[in-house]
Image (cartoon, helix red, strand yellow):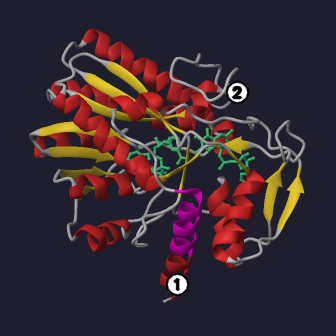
Amino acid sequence: MKVLVTGGTGYIGSHTVIELQQAGYEVIIIDNLSNSNIEVLDGIHKITGQYPIFEKFDICNSQDCNNFFSKYKGITAVIHFAAYKAVGESVEKPLMYYYNNLVSLLNLLDKILSHNINYLVYSSSCTVYGQPESLPVAENAPVQEAKSPYGNTKQISEEIIKDTIHANKKISCISLRYFNPIGAHPNGFIGELPIGEPNNLVPYITQTAYGIREYLRVFGNNYNTHDGTCIRDYIDVVDLSKAHIAALQRMLVHKNINNFEVFNLGAGKGYSVMEVVQCFEKVTGIRLKYKILNRRPGDIERVYADPQKANARLNWKATTSLDNSLLSAWNWEKYYRKKLNC
Ligand code: NAD
Ligand code: UD1
């Protein structure tokens, strides 16, 4: 069965391609490499023994999309990862974010309709919940006003998909709201490749440990949490990837017709920034330099998932410990840096 993976050379996409191949799906990737590297395909091949089909183009380009869908017939489902994702950058360049994240989705939906593809898995984010009133946060918690253009693109995208499904009875979509994806494939050949200075906590930690950054900036220690630092639900990227296969299988097996479902993908446990730092130090034996800085604008104090819906209906559960996720992230950082130097 052919599955199209947009953004398949990116961080979560590449890990999902591996799970798809290992589950026997034929994978076709579209990626314009705006935030990833073609060498990811070699990493995938090293792990699975297979190269996925790869087409490089911008999904915002409608003509390129038409050419693609004329070339590849018989695609059963689409997993749509391709998007820009840097929250801070989206505040500075909102139009770039609205254009890329929404036009790509519109184009894709248009082609999905004209080529009779019925199943879509969409990459959403827990950012849609803002600071929830009660925790853990379940899927029925209200979506709150987005704090950034990036967050808004996720909310608008879910609305666009819902309306499309409403008007086209054969289509179904599962929107997966990720909490904080971290870690790398345990085989060590693929992982997160932040371009420039990382925004997210774990790549900043591993780059600091490797000596690329002088120290970790801990953004605020005066929050109303047990140690004053923010709390998040860190979900291992391999666990996260497996949920995409479960979502796909749910739609295929149940022959889901005209359904829009959302699922929280988190481990269901919150860790503070300092707990992550301490855990990293424990598993690697490295003392991490850090400084407490002011709060980062827009940060939410605490958020973690109630993943029971995904546990029950997708038959999926996050199983990787924070220790192992941080270890895999560290192993990937070392592997990648050595590779760059040779
Ligand atoms: P990523 O940047 O590593 O991967 C996205 C990929 O999409 C990149 O390879 C990029 O080159 C490609 N891309 C972007 N725009 C494109 C376009 N117009 N045409 C073709 N290719 C394009 O990001 P990721 O961390 O793997 O995230 C994947 C998805 O998950 C995104 O939609 C993101 O918003 C969502 N998400 C990520 C996180 C996270 O913490 N990583 C959390 C919540 C949601
Ligand atoms: C951010 C986005 C979220 C997006 C996700 C993936 C915001 C408000 N949210 O989540 O919408 O889906 O990234 O890209 O930006 N931290 C430090 N030092 C650092 C980096 C982070 O202390 O150098 C802290 C942050 O203050 C936060 C925690 O670590 O408390 C996690 O931060 P991060 O990894 O950036 O993820 P989120 O902010 O949760």
- Where residue 186 appears, x then y in whole percent? 43, 68
Q: Amino acid at mark 2?
A: Gln
Q: Is residue 325 part of the magenta span, yes or no? A: yes
Q: Which residues are magenta?
A: 321-333
Could you tell whether 83 is left or right of 135 in the image? Answer: left
Prevailing secondary structure class for the magenta stretch in the rendered image = helix
Which label number is shown at residue 338? 1
Instruction: Please name the residue that numbered disc 2 is placed on.
Output: 131
Give the mark, 1 or 2, whose residue is nearer the N terminus: 2
Please indicate, yes or no, whether residue 192 appears anywhere in the rendered image.
Answer: yes
- Identify which residue is drawn at 25% across, 16% down: 258
Q: Is residue 21 part of the magenta span, yes or no? A: no
Q: Residues within 10 Å of mark 1 (few under 14, many from 20)?
A: few
Q: Residues within 10 Å of mark 2 (few under 14, many from 20)?
A: some
- Identify which residue is drawn at 22% across, 57% down: 21
Q: Secondary structure at mark 1?
A: helix
* Closer to the camera in the image, 196 or 63: 196
Residue 223 sits in quarter: top right
